[in-house]
Amino acid sequence: MADGAASVVESTGQQKWGPGIVETLGIAALVAFAGYAALFIAPTERTMGVIQRIFYFHVPSAWTGFVAFFINLIGSIAFLRTRNLKWDRLAVASAEIGVAFFTVVLVTGPIWARPVWGIWWTWDARLTSSFVLWLLYVCYLLLRTLVDETERRAVVSAVFGIFAAFDIPLVYFSIWLFRTQHPQPVIGQGGSLDSRMLNVLLLCWMALLGVMVLLLRQRVRLETLRHSVEQLRTESARDAGAE
Amino acid sequence: MALLRPTTILLKKELRSEFRTRELLTTTWVFVVTVLVLFSFTFEPTQVESRRFGPGLLWLALLFAGSLMLHPSFAREQVNDTLAALRMAPIDPVAIIASKILANLCFLLVAEVFLLPIFAALYNLSLLPILPQLLLVMLLGTLALATVGTVFSAISSHARMRELLLPLLLLPLLAPALIASTEATRGLLEDPPGLPLEWTGVLLSFDIVFLTVTWLFGEYLLEE
Amino acid sequence: MLNGLQSLTVAYMAVWAIFFGYQFSVGRRLRQLQDEVERLKTRR
């Protein structure tokens, strides 16, 4: 058993599950191209001007965040069913990354709003919902730091993660409904999308999904290594005690 | 239904143990009244203002009080590890959770029944004409709080800082229910009063969704 | 007061900083763990 843990540690040290150089460079190229497209290929918006180009990262970040939280849901359910900790590792990684993406949403929102509408924050439906979602999954991460035992931590966070995921549509719908009855200035653009804009938007989304996948694999690798090290530590302590 | 009988028995046990001392009920009631009194300093309690701010404050006060009150639900089982004894009984573990949810629902509803007259008096609102609809909204909203609160009480009982963790976990998750309850209550307090069906629908959906999720996944929280 | 182009630049930098910062944090923890692995391996 000691050799098993040691060999796992060795293989993760050799980037068995981490992203390789080729994939990283590929995604980096995609991101660079997407950034170029957002800045130069997409047509300039009529009313807002250059600042509107934030939209190409503000909106897909939210979409990618949703994907990450959906992965968290999968990981949570899969862990409860199989009790295999690899699902728990996927769950914590995807939750962290989802929070990172929604941080981008919450930071770019005000940066967009300030020059255009003269305000830092508006309690508009999308931004408010993003804020609640961000808080929800920050609570998920907080919960994890407060439970020490590995197995139990995985179980309770899985249940919380499932509750959180099913809350997402309810959050968005209730806040949207509230805003239709108590209107506030809306951040973002109304109206239909030019087809070039749509293409650039989708391109940026693909790029961000690529970033998400890279970060996810890296983070899961970290968690796997941490778990192996913990096992090695307890074995080492046990052996030392036995001598 | 094999679930009904053990749930009822456990429910009676929960109710009996609480009504023996009634400390939870009285503490909750005092807390909410205090919060309502303090909130009254934040605005002019005229009819118009009360109708605008009253519902939100009422539900916020209930949310805070509830999240403090729900904590003992599982914490008190830890003292003598009575949860292990319950688990060994040949019953569906969902019954344990269901009975606690129903018990917490009862406690909260009882507290609210005593609360409403005080709320009406302090904020100069007349609740009698809208009482049946108001009770419906209170029931649906409290059920949301009781369901999620009980499950999260089980979750936080395994964590450090559990007294702080429970309200912390509850607030973002209950946001849709809070909004819906407040808006539904506000609709009832308007002139002329009307029950907003869309918000009642949101509350109902909330309850159905999370009761189902609890039924499907709650038992994992009871394991050792 | 920042104009549109300056705000856009700030936004792009912020996005980049958030992702790079996260990757950096993960990388740092990974290196720390790998160092500990080396330590544990040489001890046995």
Image (tube, grey):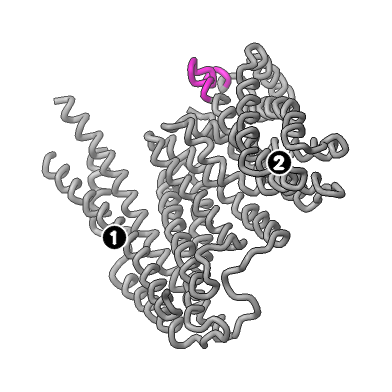
Spot occupied by residue B216 in the image (x, y as percentages of width and height): 62, 40
Q: Amino acid at mark 1?
A: Phe
Seen at 58% across and 20% down, the residue is B86
Q: Nearer the viewer, residue A97 or A25?
A: A97
Q: Is residue B192 above or below residue B128?
A: below
Range shown magenta: B75-86
Seen at 22% across and 29% down, the residue is A238
Q: Residues within 10 Å of mark 2 (few under 14, many from 20)?
A: some
Q: Residues within 10 Å of mark 1 (few under 14, many from 20)?
A: few
Chain to which mark 1 belongs:
C
> In the image, is A103 to the left or to the right of B1?
left
Residue C24, disc = 1
How many numbered discs?
2
Q: Nearer the viewer, residue A24 or A192?
A: A192
Residue A162, disc = none
Q: Quadrant of the N terminus of chain B?
A: top right
Seen at 88% across and 38% down, the residue is B129
Q: Nearer the viewer, residue A185 or B125?
A: B125
Instruction: Specify the quadrant of the image occupied by residue B62.
Output: top right
Is-magenta flag for residue A234?
Answer: no
Say if residue B207 shows up in the picture: no
Residue located beneath label 2 in the image? B45
Helix, strand or loop status at disc 2: loop
Q: Is residue B43 above or below residue A110?
A: above
Q: Amino acid at mark 2?
A: Pro
Helix, strand or loop status at disc 1: helix
Seen at 60% across and 34% down, the residue is B38
Q: Which numbered mark, 1 or 2, is in the foreground of this view? A: 2
